Each structure stands twice: as structure tokens, then as C-alpha cells.
Image: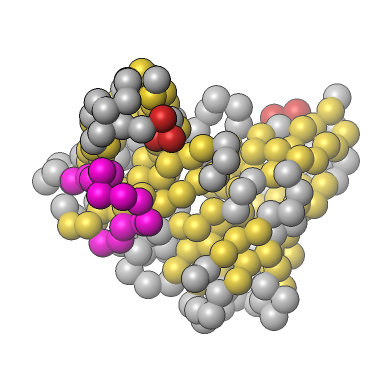
Amino acid sequence: KAGVTQTPRYLIKTRGQQVTLSCSPISGHRSVSWYQQTPGQGLQFLFEYFSETQRNKGNFPGRFSGRQFSNSRSEMNVSTLELGDSALYLCASSSQGRLTGELFFGEGSRLTVL
Amino acid sequence: AQTVTQSQPEMSVQEAETVTLSCTYDTSESNYYLFWYKQPPSRQMILVIRQEAYKQQNATENRFSVNFQKAAKSFSLKISDSQLGDTAMYFCAFGYGGATNKLIFGTGTLLAVQP
């Protein structure tokens, strides 16, 4: 069974550009969550989707957005990139709608903003 | 708001020895979960162990066990017989008991197992 797949793995953008990151969860998983990981702030929750509906959103500006498709694949978008958006973006999936099951993480997409 | 605190940024242990990583949390919730996740260098994060708050018995998974002190809001991880492959960043995380998979993570403890 394939794990959580995140693409692209690495990308470099310049300030003001926008970026779209993709996450394919484990087959059958309907819950997808996104986290931003930086050395200074650690792991911070961005948003969570379950069956195409956003259930939770973290404390991030509106430049950060996401969506989930009917096949459970999810994308997150960051518009008007800032230097501080440089981070490892992690996606996690679960078969359950609540924390009775394990969260499975992808390897992340490392974004560098110049 | 829920918070998770890991006060040990880095720790080191000799192979085959035992090490304990500390974690405290703050919440007013009565139904919640606590987790330890491991993130090896340049590899994906994996679950080490999970504890349901309503269970008094401490969770164990092979060489990994927790000391869950609910009143003190403490959740430490003990690794016995440390192995080189245990070298990783360890994150303590809090999860709500409702219909959500949202986790709140601590800042992590970088554990180095020395040969």
C-alpha cells in the first residue's frame, strides 16, 4: 500500500509568487491535514479536510488556502509568497474522522522563498 | 488554548541505555489524546506511541513506554535499550477527542544515540 505522497518535494520561489503543493493520501483515507514546519516556530497546524470539507483552520493569513478533491487528494496554495513562508510543508492522512487512528505523514514539500 | 511544552531541546544517550524525554501540556479538555511522533533525519514522521486520556494504564510499544500523569499534565517517553536507529527528533503532540485529527505539537527534542 503506497504511503502519503507529496509533490513537489523541493521547490524554490521568489517573493510575490504563488505556489501550489499537492498531497495524495493513503488509499481509502478521507482525512488530510497540513502542517508548516520551521526551525523557529516548529510544527504548526494549517488546515484539515475531511470528505472535501474544511473542518479546521489554523492561525494563518488568508494567503494560505487549501482544498480537497473527491478522490481525497488535497492541495494547498500560498499566494504572494513572503520570505517567512520558507518551510517544510507536511501532509498527514487518516482513515478516521477523529483521532482513534494513526496519522500517516508524507515526506513533505520543502519550499524556499528567495 | 492548548499548549504542549518540551523543555529538552537536545538529549544524548549511549547505545543500549535508557533515556526519558519530557513533555507537559495544558488543556481544559477532558477527552483528548497524547502522542509521541518520531522524525528521523530527512525522513517522514512516524507514530511512536499513543495514549488516550481516559485510560489510566500507561501505553507501551516494545522498547517505548510512557509515564502519563494526568493530574500533573505530564506525558514523558521512555526509550529502553536505545538503538542507533532511534536517533531522531521526537515530538510530543496533543489531540482533541472530538471529530478532528488536528494535532498541537511541542517544539521537539533532538535525541542522539551514541555508539
Using the image as rendered, state which of residue A63 and residue A97 is in the foreground: A63
Query: Which quadrant of the view contains residue A92?
Result: top left
Q: Where is residue B85 in the image (x, y as percent from the top left)?
A: 69, 30
Asked if one can make out residue A90 in the rendered structure from this viewpoint, the answer is yes
Q: Which residue is drawn at 57% across and 36% down?
A: A39
Depth check, front residue: A63 or A6: A63
Question: Measured from the top left, where is residue A25 in percent x and y?
Answer: 29, 40
Q: Residue at x 42, y 62 (%)?
A: A99
Q: What stretch is highlighted in magenta?
A: A55-68
Task: Give the image location of residue A58, x and y in percent.
Answer: 36, 56
Q: Does the magenta stretch include residue A62?
A: yes
Residue found at x 65% / y 52%: B61
- Image quadrant in which you'd find residue B54: bottom right
**Image quadrant occupied by the C terminus of chain B:** top right
Residue B34: say if magenta.
no
- Residue drawn at (37%, 72%) of the image: B98
Residue B60 point in image, percent of width and height? 67, 58
- Total marks shown come to 0
- With B58 as the anchor, is A15 left or right in this view? left
Viewer-nearest residue: A42 or A108: A42
Q: Quadrant of residue B100?
A: bottom left
